Image (cartoon, helix red, strand yellow):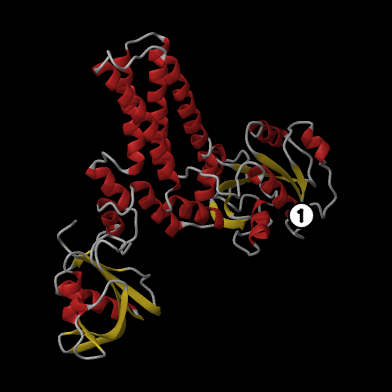
Amino acid sequence: MNSDTIAAISTAMSSGGIGIIRISGEDAFSIIEQIFKFKNPGKRISDQHSYTIHYGNIYDGEELLDEVIILLMKAPHSYTAENTVEIDCHGGILVLRRILETVIKKGARPAEPGEFTKRAFLNGRMDLSQAEAVMDLIQAKNQLALKSSVSQLKGSVSEKVKDFRKRILYETAFLESALDDPEHISLDGYSDKLSKNLEYLISEIDKLLNTFDNGRIVKEGIKTVILGKPNAGKSSLMNALLGEERAIVTEIAGTTRDILEEQLHLDGVNLNILDTAGIRQTQDIVEQIGVNRAKEQAESADLILYVVDSSCALDESDKEILAFLHNKKSIILLNKSDLLSVVTEEMIQDQIQHPVVTVSAKSGHGLKELEEIIRDLFFQGSISFNDELIITNIRHKTALEKAKESLFMVKNSICEGMPEDLYTVDLMGAYSSLGAILGEEMSEDLTQEIFSRFCIGK
């Protein structure tokens, strides 16, 4: 355990009904005993049981700071596995700061970002994948992300990785035992058995890796870029989807010159919608920068909504953009259906086999159908609403890829008839890569980088 004691405000720094100051470490109880007085005289903090709540006042010397309740948790039965005290006070910013200053004055030091969770990890309270799930839980922006984070916090990723490692360790131990004692342990036919076990492990790792794109969408949202020529109605469409006037709309072509990003909640995940500059040839330097940015965002988009002004005939610019969309997940929107249309769905589908929806950003016609098509594209069979394990963390993905590569190297060694003692090198490489997900053999720099992304007080 760490020898020093840390403290931080664990609730948002804004006015509210209550605020919480958390203290963790060897001296947590002695610190609170110096500043807390029970309403019932004669009681002592050191005499109280773990998981008990007490009512009283916090003092800085003789000055009364606030009327509070405190929660006592004795090591190792706390979030950090250390002695922990939580002070529930009134939620004013000033009172929170005054109490924290008093706690620090009595011997605690200010906690670093994520240090409470870091201590939980270092003290064996949770592994690194569970610690990262805590951060994801705090930052969850939708129901699916919340559900995934809770699942990982409960150990869904950990248990799967531990199962992989257990299988790899068994094979490694058997190999090393056979090599050390060939008279009693035979390796006859073992290569075929190992090869089958490797195929199973590689297949299971592939299943997890194949969930990453869905996991990223669950965690970060669907990057949705609205493309179209000037005055096609892109900004009007964005406003209609959001239900509020966020983008400036005028009759002047080229009004939108920079990227405007907003979020729309749809069936448990977020659409990160980007309204972009109208794509056209222009001599205006500023507008051209906007056009280039629009094209860059489209390259990395999960979904492109291409808005076509159905009241105007298609031109070469439309054909170029439609050609660009061939290998992109896209929906073509024939906007301005409230006007006389000269562009039809058949004309579009003659050039590209993507969903086409007739809409009117002005009246809202067709927007419900658009939402249904987005659901079909992303949620039917792609993102599961059951308890299927999905990978949402790029660090986990990288570690799984490295483990898979090491297992493939073992398979290649078997196919090439290499000596059995070479198998163990790559098997342990896979074992070590999977261990990185759990936080084993982690460098201090990487551990610090991960926890520095947390908020202070967690």
Residue plotted at (38% across, 74% down)? 14
Q: Is residue 439 left or right of residue 311?
A: left
Number of labelled discs? Answer: 1
Q: Amino acid at mark 1?
A: Ser
Q: Residue furthest front?
A: 184
Residue lying at 54% horizontally and 49% vertically, measured from the top left: 218
Q: Position of residue 307 (x, y in %)?
A: 69, 46
Instruction: Determine whether the residue tagged by mark 1 lies in a helix, strand or loop.
Output: loop
Q: Residue 285: in sight, yes or no?
A: no
Question: Based on the displayed image, in which of its 4 quarters is residue 106 positioned?
Answer: bottom left
- Residue 76 horizontal side relative to residue 34, left or right: right
331 is higher (above) or lower (below) than 235: above
Front in this rendered view, residue 15 or 450: 450
Location of the N terminus by quadrant is: bottom left
- What is the x, y in percent for residue 443? 24, 41
**Which x, y percent locates residue 57?**
26, 86
Label 1, residues with CA under 10 Å away: few <14, some 14-19, many ≥20 = many
Q: Nearer the viewer, residue 150 or 315?
A: 150
> On screen, 232 above or below 323?
below
Residue furthest to the top in view is: 417
Please give the name of the residue rendered at 33% of the width and 73% of the height, measured from the top-left corner: 20
Q: Quadrant of the C terminus?
A: bottom left
353 to the left or right of 273: right
The residue that disc 1 covers is 360
* Residue 100 visible here: yes
Where is residue 341? Give x, y as percent: 84, 47
User: Which residue is nearer to you in this view: 377 or 423?
Assistant: 423
Q: Does 191 appear above or below 105?
A: above
